Amino acid sequence: MSSSSPKSFGSCSEIEDDNSNNGNELRRGPWTLEEDNLLIHSISLHGEGRWNLLAKRSGLRRTGKSCRLRWLNYLKPDVKRGNLSAQEQLLILDLHSKWGNRWSKIAQHLPGRTDNEIKNYWRTRVQKQARHLNIDTNSEAFQQIIRSYWMPRLIQKINQTPPSELPITSPPEMASQTSFGFEAPTTAVAQPSAVTPLQIGGDLMGSSCSSSSSSHITQISSFQNYENFAPFVKDYYHDGGHGGGEMLNWATTAVAGDSGYPVSHCHVAENNWMESDFTGYMSNVDELWQF
DNA sequence: AACCAGCACAACCGCAGGGCT
DNA sequence: GAGCCCTGCGGTTGTGCTGGT
């Protein structure tokens, strides 16, 4: 939402009416351009923090909390707007699998993205997929679909995107690194045609119910090349210091068409999905998922 | 053209934790 | 230790937008 065209909450008009009766009443609802400018000016004078004090000093009839939220989610210069890139989506899926709904922690690894934005993305896009499949986003079945299908597709998309079309997604402090080093995919990086939706659907619907845990661990070491990923993604995965990246390795191995493709089939039966339903879902999932 | 349903996202709310007195 | 205040987090709500009918 642009600050120049604020939404008018139904309740807000009432509040503004109240304000006309009482100048001390706190404002709620969408911010106006004048309020934004006032807040920016006040922060430029006094800096961030001490939000309640800042709200009073600025003359804004807003709570400190509201000022903080407006600044961090909208006005702060390094806040990035627009659609999340495939790399950002990939990172969100991976980090959420590890940390759950720790939005602020996840946001720390996505330069310029706010916890609010990531939370909204998860609720509107990811949970929508879970609803389509009638499964819980926290279930192991959904996790498997993410790492066995969506993450490989995102990796494919990243690798298929010409460097010139890749979004500039690094924060200012990373600017010196953003030649990006995007190179042609090598070794374990996907061959785009290696996996199709129907192949994945077929794997998921296979008759075998073998455990995947031992096989996928042996595959993790096979992928160590993140050259095609943006710096902030590489920063996260490269040194392994975060203890992350296992899922990405798994997904990448899946894209590479490894014969030991680690998909458990058990959950399909556990959730009583009809094979035709699931295969149909998978065949048009790109549209649903908006890759 | 009008209506409707679903989506996207800004903003609010309640709560918890930490610091200070 | 108790009480207060501030900050930050995660969940939820509300409204404009958009696409379908």
Image (tube, coloured by chain):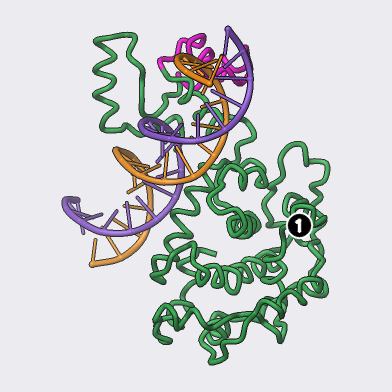
Chain colours: A green, B purple, C orange
Q: Which residue is mark 1?
A: A237
Residue A161 included in the magenta stretch of the image:
no
Question: Where A265 sits versus A288, above or below?
Answer: below
Looking at this view, is A177 or A134 the one in front?
A134
Boundaries of the magenta span:
A35-61
Q: Amino acid at mark 1?
A: Tyr
Quarter holding residue A32: top left
Give the image quarter of residue A238.
bottom right
Q: Quadrant of the N terminus of chain A?
A: top left
- Label 1 crowd (10 A; few <14 / some 14-19 / many >=20): many
- Whole-percent x and y of residue A212? 65, 79
Residue drawn at x 82%, y 75% is A187
Query: Who is closer to the viewer here, A233 or A105?
Result: A105
Q: Main secondary structure of the magenta part?
A: helix
Task: Name the outermost residue toward the bottom.
Answer: A207
Residue C18 placed where, x, y %?
A: 38, 53
Residue found at x 81% / y 74% = A222
Looking at the picture, does residue A246 appear above or below residue A270?
A: above
At 68% from the left and 57% from the top, the residue drawn is A165
Percent position of residue A215, x then y = 71, 80
Q: Secondary structure at mark 1?
A: helix
Q: Nearer the viewer, residue A152 or A1?
A: A152
Residue A43 part of the magenta-drawn span? yes
Left or right side of A280 for A215: right
Locate residue A88, reporting x and y percent.
63, 54
The answer, for residue A38, to whether it is visible in the render is no
